[in-house]
Structure formats: structure tokens, C-alpha cells
Amino acid sequence: MQTVAILGRPNVGKSSLFNRLAGRKIALVDDTPGVTRDRKEVEAEIGGVPVRLIDTAGLEEAAPDTLPGRMTASSEAALRQADLVLFVIDARAGLTAADRAFGQWLRKAPVPVLLVANKAEGRNGLQAAMEAYELGLGDPIAVSAEHGDGFGNLHDEVRDLLHAEPRRGKGEARERPLRLAILGRPNAGKSTLMNALLGEERMITGPEPGLTRDAISVEFRDEEGLIRLVDTAGLRKKARIEKLLEKMSTEASIAALKEAEVVILVVDAIQGMDEQDLRIGRLAEREGRALVIAFNKWDAVEDRTATRRKLDDTLMASFAQMKGITVVPISAANGRGLDRLMPAVRAAYGLWNRRVPTGELNRWFEVMKERHQPPLVEGKRIKLRYATMPKARPPTIAVFGTRAEQLPEDYRRYLVNSFREQFEMPGVPIRLHLRGTDNPYAEEE
């Protein structure tokens, strides 16, 4: 079992991250710096890989014989045991001198270091996380340990850096499945769809809404490989979530979405797409998941042309960040259209994983700048220098240049939309990060 150590200065959220990854509250969490003084260990599973997870005291620059000094020595001991380090910073507070000092120390570490920008809630948090590029530790993973945001990406990165696949038992390697979640409103046909995909009555179904209360995970194999499929409870509006059991069901559904790679949003074609369906789709976009819409009960729709036109108009107006979402009309009850659903899922998954080479990306980037020059802001021209694609899952573009972070929203949309069109990436979320500094990977003279 490999060891993952969580390091960082005090009060950046290491223990909250530890609890979230462990799946239960083990470490005490409080706003007071220095609550954790001893290393805590727990066996956990990250990205399907069993690990020994270590929570450490905060790193502080202090004399060895002081309490902070001894706490730092304990953290250094954890580093010597680790196969992977999660170096945590506070994106909300920004980089500190201590972050930079410990970042420089960790760059010399003999093990891989994954930079985790905690407290990165919402779009402002994601933007704040970009400052972490200055540490020279690679691409920061923006998360919120408190709210659970960004943990799908974190699980993926940990698994990849450990060079491990999920395991079924000791010493028994197993194929990595595609993680697929089925979401939608109550009674949209999610469990019927799962049964149809599995070819068996695995889930109880019926006309009563809310039959499924927990997120049910089942593995099956299609022509392309192994799939871990999760059926979830129907997601209602917050105002309707009253009972504790229903609240827990909703939390399990959202957790399944965050762990998924692709989401099938099941929409009742008779009722059409309503605001709750849109909320689920936006949540998938916010979490960076690939999305396919299963337009269920299609066989019962009378005016199919008008119904499909209305759906397309809704998608065009409501999902500007995910243009071109694949819609597959199906009837889960009689199996019609299912032969097109899984190929659509696989295609979305392939786009979600796609990387564009840096040279090809910058040739596109130069053309975009020539076609529409970056605007003036406060009388000064924004100078965009180059772009990189630090990661896929979802496709992410990092743009560097003078005052790049001041780029107006309409120009950001222009870049994202043209990138999606040029590299043929319909229906997947695309991230654009802007950094107003020099290349953090450039060699110092």
C-alpha cells in the first residue's frame, strides 16, 4: 500500500482535506491554527487506489527545540515515508512567504508533489488558484475540502501520479473502469435505464417517484471495456428536500456526480427539460464532467419535431459553456435508442480526455489574436503571449501574458468557443485559466 502525505502551513485546510479523502471525520477541524500537532494515519481509497493517508502538523519556520519546530520535524518525517505529497495552500488567502519557502523545499523532494489549492470555491476561487503556478510545482488542483468541490480531479491526479490502477484485492490488479453516473429528476426513468443497460432487473422500478434512495454502483462491460455505473436518487429542488433521509439521498447523488467522469442526464421527454434538469446539467459543468442527455420516453412523444426543437433551444440558451451536448432520444422501457447511448458516452469521454499539443495550440492561439486583437483595459493593451494545455479531464487552457487576468468575459468566451470549434470538442466543459506572469516553467538564467 502506497503512502500519501498531506503537507502545508497551518490553517490551510489539511485536516479538512484529510477527512474528506478518508470519507469520515477523523482529524479535528477548527479555524484556530495549529490544531493538528501529531501525524494521523488512516487507510483510505483515492481514485479507487488503496493508500495510507497521513495528516500532518503545519509546516512552520521555527527553531528545532520549539513546539512548532518539533511539529515541522514530524511533517518532514512524513515526507520521508511518502510515495506522494499533497502540498496544500489556501487559495483564498493567496501565496505567503511560508508557502514559497516550503514550495522551494518540496521541489527538491524525491517523491512527486501534487499542488492542492484549497478553499477555491466558485469561479473566483479557481482564478485565485492560478497564483499557485508561481511555486513551480506544476498545475494546481483547485478544491474546496469544505464543500467537496474539485475532488473528482484530485482523485484522478492522485491515481495517475501513483502509477496505480484501482485494485479489487491484495496484489490483484484490475482494469480501470469508466466512471459513469445516471442523474435526473425523480421518475425520469433512471433506474429503468440502468436495468436496460445491465440487461437485468437490478433496480426496483415503478410509477412512484423516489423509489431509489441511495446511489447504487454496479460494474458491467460493453464492447469497449469495463464501466462502473452509478444509479442515483432523483434530485429535487432544495425547497422540497425536507426529510433527513431524502437529504442524505441527495448528498449521495451529488457525490456520485463528483466522482463520475461522464454523466448521463435522464430527461423526461414528455415533460421536457425544466429548471431542475438545468441545475443538474450546470452542476456537471461546474464539476468539469462530460455530459450526455438521454431524452427518455421518446416513444410516447406525439410531436417529436416540436419537442426536439424546444430542447435544442433550451440547451443553446442555458449551456453556453458546453455547446454541442449530445442528445440521444431513447425509450428505456423498451430499449429503443440504447444502441446509440453508450457510443455517445464513449465519444464524450474521449473528448473529455483529449489533449492538444502545445505547438498546435499556439498556432491556433496566434490566429485568434490576429483575428481579434485583445482589447484595451484602462487605456492599456492586454498582451497575451502564449497558451498551454496543462491538463485534460476536462480540457483546460492556461493563457499567460501581461494583465491576462483582466481579460473581459466576452473575449474569454471568444477564445473558448473558437477552441471548441477548431479542435472539435462539442459538449464538454472547457476551462480557461488566465495568468498575468511570465512562464513559470522557463529556466532561470
Image: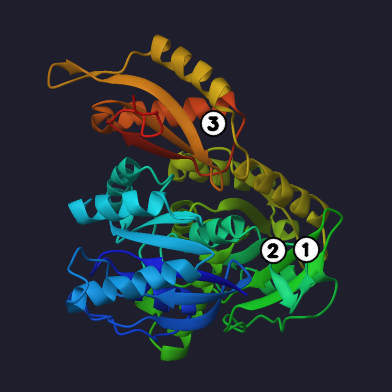
> Which of the marked residues, 2 or 3, is nearer the chain's N terminus?
2
Q: Residue at the spot x=56%, y=43% of the render?
A: 392
* Image quarter (top left, top right, bottom left or bottom right) of the C terminus: top left
| Spatial CA span between label 2 and label 3 | 31 Å
| Spatial CA span between label 2 and label 1 | 7 Å
Q: Which residue is mark 1?
A: 175
The crowding category of the residue bearing disc 1, from other C-alpha atoms within 10 Å (few below 14, some 14 to 19, many at least 20), is few
> Which of the marked residues, 2 or 1, is nearer the chain's N terminus?
2
Q: Residue at the spot x=49%, y=20% of the render?
A: 362
Query: Given contact means CB atoms under 8 Å apart, are the residues at marks 2 and 1 in contact?
Result: yes
Q: Would residue 288 appear left or right of 222 to someone viewing this image?
A: left
| Spatial CA span between label 1 and label 3 | 31 Å
Query: Given contact means CB atoms under 8 Å apart, are the residues at marks 1 and 3 in contact?
Result: no
Q: Which residue is mark 3?
A: 420
Q: Residue at the spot x=59%, y=52% of the render?
A: 291
Query: Given contact means CB atoms under 8 Å apart, are the residues at marks 2 and 3 in contact?
Result: no
Q: Is residue 379 visible?
A: yes
Q: Secondary structure beneath disc 2?
A: loop
Question: Residue 90 or 423: which is nearer the viewer?
Answer: 90
Question: Residue 164 or 182: which is nearer the viewer?
Answer: 164
| Amino acid under disc 2 | Glu
Q: Secondary structure beneath disc 3?
A: helix
Q: Residue at the spot x=70%, y=51% of the render?
A: 345
Placement of 3 over or under 248, stated as above or below: above
> Which of the marked residues, 1 or 3, is nearer the chain's N terminus?
1
| Amino acid under disc 1 | Glu
Placement of 60 over or under 336, stated as above or below: below
In the rendered image, residue 11, in percent from the top left (x then y), is placed at 23, 69
Which dot, 1 or 3, sits closer to the camera?
1
